[in-house]
Image: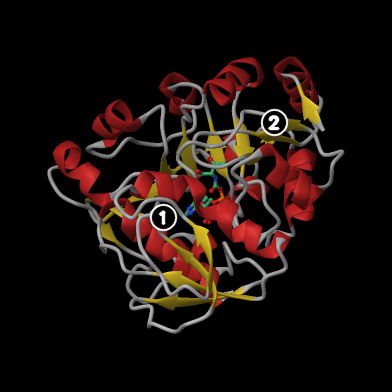
């Protein structure tokens, strides 16, 4: 059910859960002041309680009251990438963020989104926690109809059209005096070089410890269809293929286009809609053309496809 911004703001302040567009993917929002609504997010998504939520805010000033300290580089990152698809995980004043949203951790993830509707809504409501607006494990939602498909036609959605990035935010945290990437996302690794003076490492665990990004341990992004990731599509192959519009594939294949092989932004924007399309068309198995560079935004696209194929 599509609702207006005024309706969304009022519902959130009254302790309801509403789907909200961001520049990355749609989020399932609840006010940070409403633990019962936050608990409802976990139950409607089927999300494990051990997987924390990102706090979305409209300004740095708002963030200041939650943080214990700002590591070196924080301000430069904020200046360069906010509002935008960057999430920063830092230790927080635990009394200020309900434990359920943090999954009991001493840290929280923060992001100032750039989608104009999300920003305007946040101005009205104050900080909102939101995970991606999909049933846990499934591809994220990049259009209002994806949210309605997962949660029902009556679920309240603020319609912001299609999400331009199409992939979730890049998540950084600060470990041993260095920023590192704990989830690849819409900002490519290389983009941090001019801001930090180095390209952050991708780190999944601190030596022998628990995962730095709990969500990375769970099944994610997966359609029902099984995906076969292939670097070289052989002649005479048949079946369904997710591939690129500017390439020629064997004539017998049922082709679904991810976009142009020279435009990773376009492929990112289309990715989850195409994965969802496989299920809508009751396709049980599909090959994916993985012949693309392992750098920049392509690295995130490859990671999402690898996770989707593990499903
Ligand atoms: O682009 C995005 O980030 C979207 C939009 C809606 O903002 N949100 C999103 O939320 O992708 P979600 O819940 O699907 O993924 C958030 C990820 C999870 O993997 C979670 O484990 C991680 O962020 N995360 C959240 N808080 C964390 C924390 N304190 N420490 C480590 N990882 C954290
Ligand atoms: Mg998610």
User: Looking at the rendered structure, which numbered label has been put on residue 245?
Assistant: 1
From the viewer's perspective, is residue 223 above or below residue 28? below
Does the image show residue 210? no
Does the image show residue 134? yes
Where residue 67 appears, x then y in whole percent? 43, 34
Where residue 28 appears, x then y in whole percent? 68, 41
Which sits in the foreground, 111 or 305? Answer: 305
From the viewer's perspective, is residue 40 above or below residue 73? below
Q: Is residue 284 left or right of residue 102?
A: right
From the viewer's perspective, is residue 241 above or below residue 296? below
Instruction: Tell me the quarter of the image containing the C terminus.
Output: bottom right
Question: Residue 125 falls in which quadrant of the image?
Answer: top right
| 3D distance between C-alphas at marks 1 and 2 | 47 Å
Discs 1/2, front: 1
The residue indicated by pointer 2 is 33
Question: Residue 181 falls in which quadrant of the image?
Answer: bottom left
Residue lying farthest to the front in this orientation: 251
Where residue 182 appears, x then y in whole percent? 38, 57
Which sits in the foreground, 171 or 253? Answer: 253
Please name the residue shown 43% across and 75% down the image: 250
Question: Residue 84 falls in which quadrant of the image?
Answer: top left
Where residue 274 appears, x then y in whole percent? 57, 56
């Amino acid at each position: 059910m599509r609702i207006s911004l005024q309706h969304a703001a009022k519902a959130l302040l009254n302790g309801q859960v509403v789907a909200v567009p961001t520049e990355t993917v749609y989020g399932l929002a609840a006010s940070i002041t409403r633990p019962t609504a936050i608990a409802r997010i976990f139950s409607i998504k089927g999300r494990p309680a051990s997987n924390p939520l990102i706090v979305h805010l409209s300004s740095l000033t708002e963030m200041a009251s939650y943080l214990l300290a700002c590591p070196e580089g924080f301000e430069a990152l904020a200046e360069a990438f906010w509002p935008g698809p960057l999430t920063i995980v830092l230790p927080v004043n635990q009394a200020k963020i309900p434990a359920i949203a943090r999954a009991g951790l001493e840290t929280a993830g923060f992001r100032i989104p750039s989608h104009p509707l999300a920003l305007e809504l946040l101005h009205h409501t104050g900080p909102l926690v939101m995970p991606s607006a999909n049933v846990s494990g499934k591809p994220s939602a990049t259009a209002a109809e994806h949210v309605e498909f997962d949660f029902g036609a009556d679920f309240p959605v603020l319609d912001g059209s299609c999400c331009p990035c199409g992939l979730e935010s890049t998540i950084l945290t600060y470990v041993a005096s260095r920023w590192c990437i704990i989830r690849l996302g819409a900002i490519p690794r290389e983009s941090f070089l001019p801001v930090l003076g180095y390209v952050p490492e991708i780190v999944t665990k601190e030596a022998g410890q628990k995962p730095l990004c709990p969500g990375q341990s769970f099944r994610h992004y997966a359609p029902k269809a099984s995906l076969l990731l292939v670097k070289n599509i052989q002649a005479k192959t048949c079946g369904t293929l997710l591939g690129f519009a500017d390439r020629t594939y064997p004539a017998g294949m049922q082709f679904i286009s991810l976009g142009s092989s020279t435009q990773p932004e376009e492929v990112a924007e289309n990715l989850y809609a195409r994965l969802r399309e496989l299920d809508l068309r009751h396709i049980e198995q599909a090959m994916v053309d993985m012949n693309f560079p392992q750098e920049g935004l392509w690295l995130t696209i490859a990671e999402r496809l690898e996770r989707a194929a593990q499903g």
